[in-house]
Image: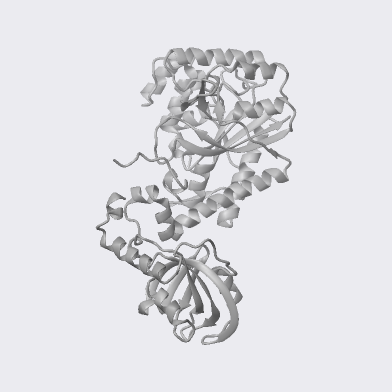
Amino acid sequence: MADERDEENPFRLARIEKLKALRAMGIDPYPYGFTVTATAKELEQRYAGLATGADTQDRVDVAGRIRAIRNSGMFIDLHDATGKIQIFSHKDHLTPEQLAAVKLLDIGDLIGVEGIVRRTPRGELTINSTKVTVLAKALLPLPEKFHGLADIELRYRQRYLDLIMSEESRETLRRRSRIVACIRRILIERGFLEVETPMLHTIPGGASAKPFNTHHNALDLELYLRIAPELHLKRLLVGGLSDKLFEINRNFRNEGISPRHNPEFTSLELYQAFVDYHEMMNVAELLISEAAKEVLAGTQAQFGDKVIDLTPPWPRKTMAELVQQATGVDFLALSDDAAARDAARRLGADCPSSAGWGRALEAAFAAKVEDTLIQPTHVTGFPREISPLAKADRNDPRLTERFETYVNGWEVANAFSELTDPLDQLDRFKQQMKEREKGDEEAQHLDADFVLALEYGMPPAGGLGIGIDRLVMLLTNSPSIRDVIAFPTMRPKA
């Protein structure tokens, strides 16, 4: 941006001269407000039946950004958040002072227009301006119309410029808003209570992830940015605030950046008392399929060259079953950690020497199965070793009642039959601490207060988390998480 702000930039200098001229005419180029009575979309709908060449006596006030100027300002394409309307500025309708102000306008300026609606002989819905108000004089030109922002990095760094130029980018973020609103509406209709939990934690917990840390000066206290709201939401369940709770939350994880990972991200997390993870599968299917209907008018999602059918119900398969189908290796038949590690390594999985049976199974799944799960699939039977907050499987103590939902090869949901036994939870935390001692920075900390809360009794419950960013990627055919986050995390330019 430094070169664009350079005092020698001729485009900027020319616009500053026009700014000075406007002020010399007594015009404030940055006023306090403007009353808008109609949007471009509303006018298109209202006057859809207006005949070619027809005039009206209807006066409207519109506002937007100039995207094209023709004939020295006689014709202006004005864009607002809903669409485009043509503005006609002529001496028959404007004072000489107003005409002089129009000649000082540039593409990119924000203006308000008062005028009368008509349809031109060429069929263009148009406003004959009777007054033009400068709302913001743009000092920098917009990118060239037909190429827009060719620099992808610049699109993310200067998102405001990307949004000005790209209807596709605007529509992606609008769909994101509609998806979140749809999920919130469905949960509230089903009796869930929306709550808020802390973003600053004394102990990072609720997920296996490396946290960001900060310092509170007044308390002289080391704090962590939330990696997940789980343990605080469960405390509310213990307290009986409601049998159904949810939070649409911001989380922060000090991990790598990729097309599917941003250090700051949004997720939905919900808990329902007296049900298990089978009901959470139903809830996940409902929320995701209804979000698809909200923005796609159906449950078929196009992603790249793939068509993904989100119509419930979805297949439910165990992790071990999927690995055996893909590789022929039955991990459930392997008797010890060493045999499981050897099997995973033979399959090409990254499996450290500290990995137990469960981590070896997970590594084999990640290497051979995960990317193949294009159509929605609930993967169940997660190993206990990697699931410290989930109840043990009723038939195999090596496993837990946990599932992750995969779509397009991505994990988009994670759910448990929640662990409510305080003594078992304490043992799981202690095992996690041993993993930390071995060097696993993502292993969970021991949260003694959470164990204390469980000792007062937590009802049996199912819990579900859905990654909002990945869901929006899926439903907007967006290949990068940066496309669906308004301001993704970026390394500052030198």
Choose between 387 and 449: the one closer to the eye: 449
Q: Is residue 206 above or below residue 316?
A: above
Percent x, y of residue 484: 47, 47
Provide residue 345's location: percent of width, then percent of height.
37, 22
418 left or right of 162 in image? right
* Colour scheme in use: one colour
**Can the viewer see residue 127 in this picture?**
no
Residue 20 relative to residue 219: left or right: left
- Front-most of 320 and 328? 320
User: From the viewer's perspective, is residue 269 above or below residue 155?
Assistant: above
Tell me the residue at 42%/30% (across/down). Answer: 255
The relative height of residue 27 versus residue 379 in the rendered view (above or below) is: below
Image quadrant for the C terminus? Answer: top left
Q: Residue furthest left?
A: 8
x, y (%) of residue 197?
Answer: 62, 32
Looking at the rendered structure, the number of numbered marks drawn on it comes to 0
Q: Position of residue 436 (x, y in %)?
A: 46, 16
The answer to whether residue 318 of the structure is visible from this angle is yes
What residue do we see at 71% from left, 23% from top?
A: 458
Quarter residue 258 falls in: top left
Q: Nearer the viewer, residue 338 or 9?
A: 9
- At horizontal 32% and vertical 66% (from top left) the residue drawn is 17
Q: Is residue 468 above or below residue 345?
A: below
